[in-house]
Structure formats: C-alpha cells, structure tokens
Amino acid sequence: MKTKIIFTLIIFAGIYGCKKNSQTPVQPQPENNVFVVNPTFYVNGVPSLEGWTVPDSNTVRFSDDIPPNGSSSSIVFNVSMGPMLGWPDNSIYTTFTVPEGRHVYRLSVVGKMKFVGGASSGEVEVNCNRPESNNSKYLTSIDILDTNWVTYSCIDTIQTVPGDSIYLTIYGGSCECTGQTFINSCDFEKID
C-alpha cells in the first residue's frame, strides 16, 4: 500500500512540480524548543486554527471525536476521491523558523483514520524552504494509518542555513474510497 502511495506521489510531482510556500514564517519560541503555535487546535477554551494557514475552509472542520486524555477538539478532513491533489489542496499548514545548523527534531502527531471501501491515509509532512531555491526540500513525514487513536512520532536530524524556514503540512489524504482523517495534535520540537 505504501509503495502505491509513493508511486502516486512521484507521478504527481513529475506532472505538476513542487510549489513553494510563501507564508511568512513564525519566529521560534526558543525557551521551550517548540515551534508550532497551536499544536492542539484549541485556544482559550475554544476550537481554533490560529497559527495555521487554511487554503480552503471547506476541507477541514472541528470534531468532538477525541482520544482519551487528548485536547478538547480534533480537526477532521474528508478524504478526497481519486488521485492525491497537489499542495495545498485538502490540507492546512504552518510555517516557522528553527535554529540554524544541525539539530535533532521530533515530529509528533495524534491521529486516526475512518474509511469505507478501501484503504486511505492522511499525512503530516515537513519540508524546508531555502531562499535560493524555487522548490521546497522534503524532510520527513508520518502517514496516519490506524483506525484507533495513535500517537505517531518520528525523530530526524535536520541541517538548516540562514534564511531557511520549515513548513509543516497536514494532508487529509485521498483514495478511491470514502473516509476521514482526524488529527488531535501535531507538534514539532527540537530535542537536542
């Protein structure tokens, strides 16, 4: 299944190319090494997408389907029918800067899938924008594959130079089925 998704992504990238993220990066919060402004989609007691860019407000909504001990609200995307759409379709994203140099980061996501008639996956992807490049550089990603609430996590070492910005995108997913991607939290933190 993962091979099929990767093959589809390669074909899509070859046909449509990569788009550069033009959102102004958020400055980091160096005192706690956390970079996502609103990782739980909940601000001042209400569901919120503050800190996230929402290209199409029809693609994401709030849900009270939450994991035990999770934040008070989740976001949910309907899975797109057919081939995966290009960035930023069926997604939300946030952009921020990180300290220059080589550092170790953890991407953590609490999410799940619901699907009927086939398999699907949402995805959280991290890319780097470099000023002298017209394209972004893929860094790492997590596929949301389980039908139960799961904490997904990956650790990666990232090398950045002056002017780089990181953008983190949550994709709703696509397949020849009916489904939904639920995300209760999404965070990116420096751990070294």
Image: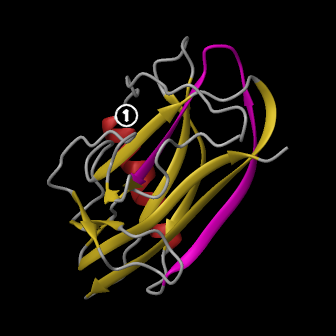
In this rendered view, identify the residue nearer to me: 119 or 161.
161
Residue 169 belongs to magenta span: yes
Examine the rendered structure and indicate whether residue 175 appears above or below residue 134: below
Residue shown at the point (61%, 30%) measured from the top left: 28
Q: Position of residue 19 (x, y in %)?
A: 37, 30
Q: Which residues are magenta?
A: 149-170
Left/right of residue 34 with respect to residue 47 in the rendered view: right
Examine the rendered structure and indicate whether residue 144 appears above or below residue 20: below
**Residue 17 visible at all:** yes
In this rendered view, identify the residue nearer to me: 72 or 152.
72
Q: Position of residue 190 (x, y in %)?
A: 74, 43
Residue type (three-letter) at the residue carrying disc 1: Gly
In this rendered view, identify the residue nearer to me: 87 or 96.
96
Give the crowd class for mark 1: few <14, some 14-19, many >=20 residues within 10 Å.
few
Give the main secondary structure of the magenta stretch.
Answer: strand
Examine the rendered structure and indicate whether residue 174 appears above or below residue 9: below
**Residue 78 visible at all:** no
Q: Which residue is mark 1?
A: 17
Residue shown at the point (74%, 22%) measured from the top left: 100
